[in-house]
Amino acid sequence: MKKVLAILLMTTSSLAFSAEPPKDPSRQISWGLYLDSKEAHAMKTSAVGSKVLFVDVRDPVEIMFTGFTDVVDINIPFMINNRQKWNSKKNVFAMEVNQQFEPLIAEALKKQQLSKDDPIILMCRSGGERGAPSAKALENKGYKNVYVVVDGFEGDTVKTGDKKNFRLVNGWKNSNLPWGYKLNKAKMYQE
């Protein structure tokens, strides 16, 4: 059964999922496994979806204000807001790497009776600022199939017009996929 599932996943991912790698090299990963939000939804809700770990890597406070999809299995932030430090360049609270990120991914896999060989989907806000770095944090640690959602939860910004800089171009929220502002406490990261 496991062999059949592996073949089905490989076939599905090589034929159906064709998101282009990001142009920015800092948003690329060595695995070269990319999904857009619709493809991530299709993979997670497919017949093999229970064999996929879908992780929202955003800070829970961000999720509270921008929305959440219950399609994800768990929220494990890659970067955590530190209200004790200030980022004067961006004029916001500092964000720091969550040192528990990889151990929490391993724990989430174990809870779902999955292994490091099973697919993991990582989704951040825009698809690259935390998506690719969170995938890179799993490199050389035994993980085999780590996908990054290239358009993220909120998508890209509009470049011109009265909606300039609003995240309305693509992404989970703008693709008619299920989401809302109600959080699922059981899935949310809590320190």
Image (tube, helix red, strand yellow):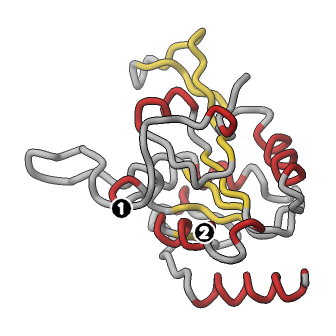
Q: Residue at x 65, y 65 (%)?
A: 147
Residue type, mark 2 in image = Thr
To which residue does mark 2 refer? 45
* Residue 85 x, y percent position in the rendering: 57, 12
Residue 19's x, y, as percent?
49, 75
Quarter of the image where the C terminus is located: top right
Outermost residue on the left side: it is 162
- Disc nearer the start of the sequence (1/2): 2
At 55% from the left edge and 86% from the top edge, which residue is drawn? 16
Left or right of residue 7, residue 60 in this image = left
Instruction: Give x and y (percent) for residue 139.
Output: 79, 58
Residue in the image at 54% along x and 61% along y? 149
Q: Which mark is residue 176?
A: 1
Separation (CA) of disc 1 from disc 2: 15 Å
> In the image, what residue occupies the spot 25% across and 44% down?
166
Count of numbered circles on the image: 2
Q: Is 180 on the left or on the right of 130, as rendered? A: left
Badge 1: residue crowd in 10 Å (few <14, some 14–19, many ≥20): few
Question: Looking at numbered disc 1 in the image, what kind of residue is underneath it?
Answer: Asn
